[in-house]
Amino acid sequence: MQTAFMNRLAGGEPLVWLDFYDYAGAKLAGAAGIPWLDEAAFAAFHGKAQGLLGSDVITVPVARIAEALLRANPALSSALGEKKRPAYPLRRLLEDAGLRQAVSALLGPLRAADGERPLALVLPSPRQWLAAAYAVAHGEPMAAEVASDPDEIDGAAVYVANFLGEFATAGVDLVLLCESPDDGARSGEDLALYESVFKTCRHFRWAIGLLDPAGLLPVHEAGALDVLIAPAGSREARVPEVFWMAGGEALAPANARLYQGVIPADAVPETVLDRLAVLRRREGQAELAEVSA
């Protein structure tokens, strides 16, 4: 199934997908921070950041919205820990009407402000969110054997899939699941535990992506994915944070069809603009060095 995002990705020129929230938050948001729960203020903030940096993909980071909601709503934070079942905190969070409304409130203006660029919902993978929600709820890490239990991960994927169904008409083009730098799906079998999420994406004709910052998933095991963003061996390249810093020598791989990276909060604006020019060169792509794994 060819989605709108995949059609755009096949258009010829590489896409530059920026997670600019740390950087723009430090430079534009001031002491108050990014206004995740204020629709109008967030739209104004995002418009300034996007105007300066011009990401080819518009990103809505669901975990950051959830974190802001939990800080603002102590009752919800307490409710996550009401039951000891491993997946209960994630289920309670994702079923919360306030979270769904907060995400919807940002999606609408972003889609209305830019109908051309792909709109991506970015969220932790079921594996990551299962453990993270438990840690928030109970103030301690989830036991390793529970966090890696296939049944628990599969159940978490069902909750994530149900949550995503809330945004069927929001103009989403892509769902990107994010693994951690030291843990994540390592095989097709691991990836299959996310199948509930994949089914929802296919139903709504959304592209399916995985951010694999450690490169744990072999490319040949990524059959269910449309996009695999990894440090090496993928046509969708993860750009290292050092790339954005003065003196950084690691550059994006040549000939990628997508470059994705997080701009650090302490990056220097002049250096950021210089690096963006490197990524957006229409010629001389062969001069770019391969990123270190």
Image (spheres, rainbow, N blue to C red):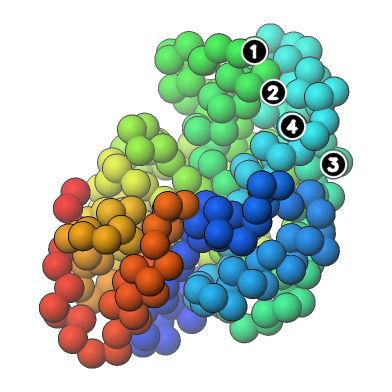
Q: Position of 255 compared to 225: left or right? A: left
Q: On the rendered structure, is 58 left or right of 91? A: left
Q: Dot 3, crowdedness within 10 Å: few (<14), some or many (≥20)?
A: some
Q: Mark 2 and mark 1 in contact (Cβ < 8 Å)?
A: yes
**In percent of the image, x 72 and y 73: which residue is there?**
111
Task: Please tell me which of labels 1 and 2 falls first in the chain.
Answer: 2
- Name the residue carrying label 4: 71
Q: Residue under circle 1?
A: 138
> Which quadrant of the figure has residue 163?
top right
Name the residue type under label 1: His
Q: Residue at x 86, y 41 (%)?
A: 97
- Find the residue positioned furthest to the bottom: 283
Q: Residue at x 59, y 37 (%)?
A: 157
Marks 4 and 2, the one that precedes in the sequence: 4
Decide: few, some or many residues near mark 1? Use Cα within 10 Å; few <14, some 14-19, many ≥20: some
Q: Is residue 40 left or right of residue 223?
A: right
Q: Nearer the viewer, mark 2 or mark 3?
A: 3
Camera-side residue: 67 or 230?
A: 67
Image spot of residue 210 (x, y percent): 44, 52
Which element is circle 2 on?
Answer: helix
Residue 93, numbered label: none
Pointer 2: residues within 10 angstroms few (<14), some, or many (20+)? many
| Residues at marks 3 and 1, CA–CA distance in whole angstroms | 21 Å
Mark 4 lies on a secondary structure that is helix
The amino acid pointed to by label 2 is: Pro
Q: Which mark is residue 98?
A: 3
